[in-house]
Structures are given as structure tokens and as C-alpha cells.
Amino acid sequence: MGDTTTAGLAGLAGRIAVVSGAAGGIGSAVCRVLGGYGVSLAAVDRDEARLEKVVRGLVDAGISATAFPLDVTDPVAVEETVARVEATVGPVSILVNAAGILRTGPILELSEADWSAVLAVNATGVFGLSRAVGRRMAARRGGCVVTVASNAASVPRVGMAAYCASKAASALFTKCLGLELAEFGVRCNVVSPGSTDTPMLHSMWSDDSGADATLGGSLPAFRVGIPLGKLARPEDVAHAVAFLASDAAGHITMHDLCVDGGAALGA
């Protein structure tokens, strides 16, 4: 890591970040990594019990973190929570959209309820939180937004239509946001993980062979494996988020950084 990158990441110290999905595998890793650089965290998740456990762990590790239970699909609650964060923690300069859910199944059997739930969290939730925070960043003429999408946003997946569509929507929305907020000095980027060692991935496995099947791919499902031969760790994704949130990425906006071990073949 060069001196410029090191200095850019060090510059994160003292900033305030809202991280949605903070109780999840990737979201909690983002909190740990940003907190390790001295960022004060407003940790957001709708699972209040898990959120409190994550925040206790962060505080015990010497990280400044406060729990803000929130369902990102509720636009009124989103606006109220962002206002409360700014009133109690301070002005937000980093937003990480990491909240996400997964519902799988063949399209012809997919229920309207599952489709709507996935789009509500993964796409509409990103819109609402980004709008609420983005308005404040634009008024202050600075800040950055990083949305955790997926390599499934650019590669069709059997049985994952709702997830793929929602992540594609969130990724392109974030790029549009970056275009509109560029004049205010607000950068907006995307991190697209592949298969990551989290409870969400484990939920897709039916037995102990799940990891090997993910690494090896599936010809019947038109899915290649992972060329690097390993699953991503949540921290792999979190470090990519931290880079894009830092001054080391100060001239990067509307970019999609894929962190998938080559699984999407660079798509």
C-alpha cells in the first residue's frame, strides 16, 4: 500500500458514517473496518437484538458506535432516523448501503410477496436512505455514498431473479446519484461482492458440500466457479468499501468495484 493510499485511509478518522445492514455479515465487517480507521458509526439495522450485539462488540473494541434500529423500507422512519443521527452523533459524511435480503426460487414460481420484499429492501431502501443522507451531504457540499450491490447485478443467475434485479437497480441508481451529486462534491460508488462467507450465502446451501459447489460452479445452472479458488471474507468487501469512502479514492465516482475472485469473469 502506497503512502498516498495510507494517508487517504488515515483521513477517515473523525468522520461519521451511517452503515445500513450493520447486523449482517458484510455490514458488521464494514463497521469494524471503518471503526478501525477512527470513523464514528451510526449502525442501522431492523434486527434490533443482533444490532445491539454488534454495537456492544464494536464499543468493547474501542470503536465509537451507536445503534439506530431502522427498517429501511419505511421512508418516514428513514428520514426521522437520519435526522436523529445528525442531531446526536453529528453530520454524516459517509453512507454505506449494506442492508440486503435474499429470496430465491424459479421465476414462474416466485411470489409477488418475495419479489416485493427483495426490491423494497435492496433497491427502494437504498433510494430512501441515499436520498435522506444525500440531501444533507449536498447542502454541505461533500461526502460519499457506497452501495454494496452484487456481481449478480451483471450476471443472470438461475433462481435469483428478484435478487439480481434488485442489485442491478441499486447499482445503477447509485451511479445516477453520483452523476447528480457530483456538482456538490459528493462521490457515489458501488462495491459488488461475489460469494462471501456470510449467513446469507450459507442459507443457500443444503448440505456440507455447499462451499465446494460454490467454488466449483455448476454447469446446469450456467454458473462458473471462483477462479481464485476461495470464498470472499466479509473483510475483503469491507476494505473495498473503506477505500472508496476514503480520500485515497477522492477522484473516483460512479464506479463499480467487483470483489468476487473473478467469478463474473470481469463482467
Image (spheres, grey):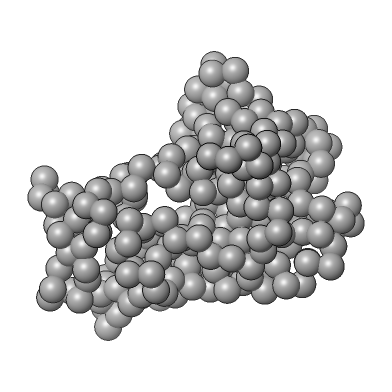
Looking at this rendering, what residue extends furthest in the front direction? 2
58 above or below 166? above
- The residue depicted at 26 percent of the width and 54 percent of the height is 228
214 above or below 155? above
Relative placement, left or right, of 117 versus 262 is right
- The residue depicted at 50 percent of the width and 43 percent of the height is 239
- The residue depicted at 25 percent of the width and 74 percent of the height is 158
Quarter of the image with the C terminus in it: bottom left
Relative placement, left or right, of 133 versus 106 is right
Relative placement, left or right, of 45 versus 134 is left
Q: Is residue 262 visible?
A: yes
In this view, the residue in front, 210 or 81, is 210
Find residue 191 and report its horizontal and vertical position in percent: 51, 58
In this view, the residue in front, 130 or 184, is 184
Q: Is residue 121 visible?
A: no
Find residue 258 and report its horizontal and vertical position in percent: 44, 61
- The residue depicted at 70 percent of the width and 69 percent of the height is 177
Find residue 237 and report its horizontal and vertical position in percent: 45, 48
Find residue 94 and report its horizontal and vertical position in percent: 70, 47
131 above or below 197? below
Quadrant of the image occupied by residue 234? top left
**Number of numbered discs present?**
0
